[in-house]
Amino acid sequence: MDSPWTQIPEVAGATAESKMVKMDDGWSIRVMRWVPENDSGSTPLVMIPGWNSVYEGWQDIVEKWASKRRVTYIETREKGSAVSIGRPRKSDLSIHRSVEDLKTVIAEFPEISSGNDWFASSLGATIILEALAESAFEPRSVALLAPNTSFDFPLWSRLLIMMPSFVYPPLVRLAIVYLDFKLKEEGQRIRYRRTLLASNVKRLRLSALSNGAYKMEEGVSSVDDRIALITAKSDSLHAAGAIDFLTEHLPNSQCIEVPSNQFAHNAEIIPILEAFQDGS
């Protein structure tokens, strides 16, 4: 079976392509794109998945959308698809660095710089908000699932993060056991299990070390784009306080509650997102 970080997923009715976009520090990140054979004229979509998310977790949505609208799917540095030069450092995996990466991707594909709909989850959502605060692009709309305003890892996981990388592979299994206990949604448990098994654990550790010090500032209050904040009561992994903070600080935002985090990864959410994107 192909690695989730190297295969180019085919979508019926669309042409797929994958490109490694090189950054100014030598890293490269993967950008996948689908162009529909019969374009419906819908506004193109840009997706940034969450921390270490594999494509499989978003496949249902991509396949539904890519058959009728252009989709650009951006993978961030902690994912196994990224290519690094030399030994990665904690600073290579920071939120700031990911924002700079996004700017480089936008320069590579200038057609996504304005007028597109954007959809992102967790880490990807955080990157988008920080980029919008810097006026990096001009979206038509932005939908954010479980965005993070900080990364408050459990105490036990902070101790694990500080351990050397060579002890991580066996601890992945322990993390899976913890998530099986912590998460209420079966679909979410399965998704995280697959994600962890496919992870580059050294990068995840550096990313966690870097993100642990991150806290979103009130500067995001300058973002006046139309933003949907998508949340699910049953999602026990992402902090509800983030939605409260963003609702207060984003003047043109609205909260959309869905039945579950897994629901937001399925094509069932598309009519809800399209109604928001079209301003209905």
Image (cartoon, helix red, strand yellow):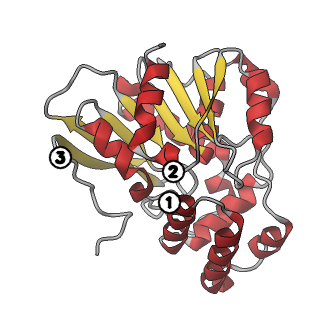
Quadrant in the picture for the N terminus:
bottom left
In the rendered structure, the answer to whether residue 192 lies left or right of residue 12 reads: right
Kind of residue at badge 3: Ala
Q: Answer yes or no: do the residues labelled 3 and 2 have beta carbons within 8 Å?
A: no
State which tag comes first along the sequence, 3 or 2.
Answer: 3
Quadrant of the image occupied by residue 65: top left
Q: Is residue 23 visible?
A: no
Residue denoted by label 1: 79
**Residue at 42% of width from left, 25% of height from top?**
274
Q: Residue at x 70, y 43 (%)?
A: 148
Which residue sits at x=22%, y=52%?
10
- The three-letter amino acid code for the residue at tag 2 is Thr
The residues tagged by marks 1 and 2 sit, at their Cα atoms, a distance apart of: 6 Å
Q: Nearer the viewer, residue 240 or 162?
A: 240
Q: Is residue 267 left or right of residue 142?
A: left
Q: Any mark on residue 76, and which?
A: 2
Q: Position of residue 42 (x, y in %)?
A: 30, 21
Label 3 or label 2, whichever lies nearer to me, is 3
Q: Quadrant of residue 179?
A: bottom right
Q: Are marks 1 and 2 in contact (CB under 8 Å)?
A: yes
Q: Earlier in the sequence, mark 3 or mark 1?
A: 3
- Most extreme residue toward the front is 259
